Amino acid sequence: MKRKINTDYKDKIEVVDIGNDKLKRLLGKGKLGDGEIDAYTEFLRRRDETREKTSQFYNVGFVKLDVNKGPQLKETRQLKKNKRIFDMKYLFIPINVGSHYTCVVVYMEDKRICYYDSYKSTKTRLGVNAGKEKRMSILTIVLEYLKTKYSEIKGVALPGEWKLEPTCLEIQQANTKDCGVFVCMYMDFIHDGCEVNFDPDEFTSEDMRKWMTMMLLIQTHKKNMKEPDDSKGDECIVIDSMTFSAKAKKIIMKSKWNESFQIGVECEFNRKACIECDEGCKGGDKCKNRNIQKSGYKKVKVRDTNGKGEGLFADEDIKKGEYIIEYVGQIKYSHNGSDYNMKYYDIDLLIDGKGKKGNASKFINHSCNPNCILEQWCVKGMPHMCFFACKGIKIGTELTFNYNWELVAEDEEDFKSRANICRCGTKKKEHYMERMVLARKRSKK
């Protein structure tokens, strides 16, 4: 796929006051260092989180060249814990080979390991093609790394024939200082599924540096930007998906819930088990059981309910069984008294949807005759609390579900004194949002 370079930013970028030393060095004319390349790799890593099939990005220090021992790998603790490396689309490995930067890209689906060098290939403007033996040694150790990882994770040998490609035929740098810039551009274009097709006379190294600087500025802006207030009425809400810390993932892996499911290749089997398919299902690219992964949520609005405070309303017609929205927020390890806590089934974790990490789903009100149902789905091994339509819902209709709260009480009088009166309006007789559980029955359990 061809990629058109947008250079409309040229005049704008020069008036931005860049305080970060890495960004200043990017705009200069000197050679980039490990820090600048790792910073851009981090930008690509964050961009990658939005993709359906993700990639693995390594820092420059992953491959070290030893004069006596040859190339050596230095795997971090986080990389050692990664069990999904063979579910990735690409592996990107930038390398410092002394006074020069290159990179290795592993095409996982094609079983190819390619070496990208903007200064030493048959297509270079300087007409040299040196160091093939060194390049092959780097590719070989990367292949050995894949074999070792596959054996550790799967318990068997790495399948298939893997092709090592040591000669880079992509566009080359015109000087001795832009190797780091070209490495970043190689990774950027390949990650975007595009040919490295730019003309260095039209898209110069100066343009590349400005492009990289602008991308990092956008990343910094998004990081520091205030989140929109999703409590205001008649606004369409941007929905995010849950993220889990290393501590939370560890608790999930040891939970009863984690032992209760097994993903299969049949889409219908997975769907009935509340498991979203992965790339190995029979549905392939046409699989319809990946709505949560693809953020296939419905259009919703927050507005006043005339008596129950704010509520969440459908902003489009929704069919029975369709996925609506995910309940997201801050992971909590114990109840903090928030009215927006949502507990996972069979996992000692809670979601607090009240803070900045919450979304519009926290405004869904209770009803004794709801039009939504809450289900806990497994998506790529992680639990996600999601709302689905349990009946057809017309545009403008308030979304509701049964909170199904328990209230432990000594007797009915105690229960009524502490329970919340339901205002859903579906029953004529006074009733409550909670259901009573007698203390003596709870103690017997």
Image (cartoon, helix red, strand yellow):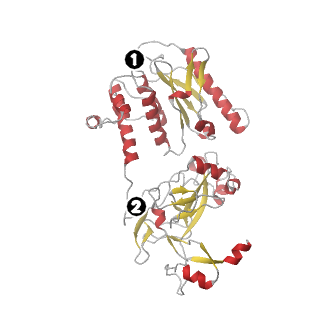
Image point 58% across, 27% down: which residue? 113
Is residue 104 visible in the rendered structure shown here? no
**158 over 232 or under it: above or below:** above
Image point 54% across, 38% down: which residue? 55
Question: Total label count?
Answer: 2
Horizontal side of residue 445 vs 32, given as left or right = right
Q: Quadrant of the C terminus?
A: bottom right
In space, the residues marked 1 and 2 are separated at their CA atoms by 51 Å
Q: Are marks 1 and 2 in contact (CB under 8 Å)?
A: no
Which of these two is toward me, 306 or 263?
Answer: 306
Residue 22 % position (x, y): 38, 32
Residue at far bottom of view: 429
Instruction: Say which residue label 2 marks.
Output: 230
Residue 382 % position (x, y): 60, 52
Which quadrant of the figure has residue 316?
Answer: bottom left
Which of these two is toward me, 326 or 318?
Answer: 326
Residue type (three-letter) at the residue carrying disc 2? Asp
Name the secondary structure under disc 1.
Answer: loop
Horizontal side of residue 193 vs 270, given as left or right = left
**226 over 26 or under it: above or below:** below
Horizontal side of residue 96 vs 233, given as left or right = right
Question: Crowdedness of circle 2 by 10 Å Cα count: few (<14), some, many (20+)?
Answer: some
Name the secondary structure under disc 2.
Answer: loop
Instruction: Say which residue label 1 marks.
Output: 176
Residue type (three-letter) at the residue carrying disc 1? Thr
Image point 44% across, 34% down: which residue? 39
Which badge, 1 or 2, comes first in the chain's sequence? Answer: 1
Residue 320 % position (x, y): 55, 67
Which of these two is toward me, 65 or 91?
Answer: 65
